[in-house]
Image: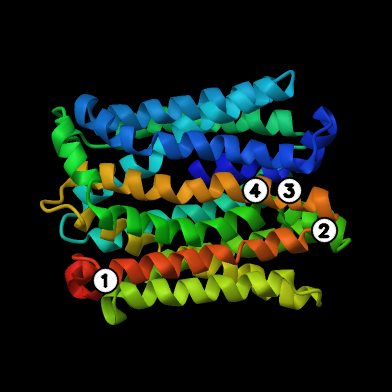
Amino acid sequence: MATLSLYAIPAYADAISARFALSGAEVGALTSSLAVSYALIQVPAGLIAARVGTRESFVASLCLVAAGFVGTAAAPDFGVLVACRVLTGAGAGMLLPLGSSLARSSLPGRNMRAQATIGTGWGLGYILALIVVPAAFSTWRIAFLGLGGSALILCFFAGAIISGRTVERGAVPSRVARDLLGEPAVWLIGTCLFGLTVGIVGVGTWIKVFAEDQRHLSATTAALLGVLIGIGLLPASVTGGVLARRIGPRSVIITSSLGVAGALLLVVAPVGQVVLAFGLLGLGWFSALPFGVVLALAGEAARAPDSVSQAVLVGAVNGSAFVGGAAAAPLVGALRDATGSFGPGFASLVSGPVIALVALGMLQRSAHVDLLARREQVE
């Protein structure tokens, strides 16, 4: 649902742009407005859950997503549309840290596997956003109304199936939260994920428009190309967890950074559609490969990791990552407006993997270097 909230706009970008007479930068702002609220709510989500309960907070977050989707469907102008995207982002932003906390509680001793499994939802949501939702709903207003109804159904479903025994209550003292967030390793891990998120958000937001307008492909072919990112995403997170237990988290992150950079270059290259397809598939695969690894590392950065600290730390890491999401889409859109081509914007996203490698090098030299060397112990 969190991924759907991010990529539902790109699926209807042309129709929304025509309805409100938007520039490329403004269309990108619809993604970045969600990404900003998504990022800002990450850490507070864990603290709220510690006070009122993870199950209750998780259900409330789905209600916010539902309200945001319905408001988007009814938006009369661009300002209201942005406000509803911010509301959707606030709800969607709570889902990952709270889901990560629930996963850690549900599978004690197997945190890497639990976090990697959560990562598969990224690819599923991407495929639903670009293929299933446009096929099921002919207009964007009906689509967002349908998504709002689906989120509301999930509210009741989540409340019914999430066991009360997985919920931890009791306020987290502000001092404890400061200690958790004061670990430099947390922010370096978040910067790694930031670097690996920039490319997929920047390309994923614009791939349908890019394929139709610049590559002159049909809407169906453009959508199918976009889905290749989701196909790459689906198995990669679990695979990354398996690889981390064999070769270590550091090697997984390095492989992902180099792979994302190479995939972006294939997407930018003015060659045939087969190369573009491999680039998109690789972008999805290498972006998701370290996802579960990074979430598990975030939890292990705490001295006494538990499900509450998992939520707070994952919130910090994922919030850092979505700063990249907030910047990538409007950057690509603005460069397209300025140059008339997506090439410069997509090429600029290669800076993301470079940032990830720099942050990894700093983490390697920090007091938490042991996190990167762990294999089975990361579990």
Q: Give SS at disc 3.
A: helix
Q: Which of 212 and 186 is in front in this view?
A: 186
* Sequence-earlier tag: 2 or 4: 4
Cα gap from disc 3 to disc 4, whole angstroms: 6 Å
Inspect this view and state whether residue 362 appears.
yes
Residue 113 appears in which quarter of the rendering? bottom left
Q: Which residue corresponds to the image point at 49% horizontal and 42% vertical from the top-left?
A: 2
Q: How crowded is mark 3: few (under 14 residues within 10 Å), some or many (20 or more)?
A: many
> Dividing the image into 4 quarters, which one contains the C terminus?
bottom left
Q: Earlier in the sequence, mark 1 or mark 2?
A: 2
Element at badge 2? loop
Q: What residue type is labelled 4?
A: Ala
- Write the residue at 84% across / 31% down: 21
Label 4 vs label 1, nearer the camera:
1
Which residue in the structure is indicated by mark 2? Answer: 341
- Image-based side of 368 in relation to 141, left or right: left
- The residue at which mark 1 appears reads as 365
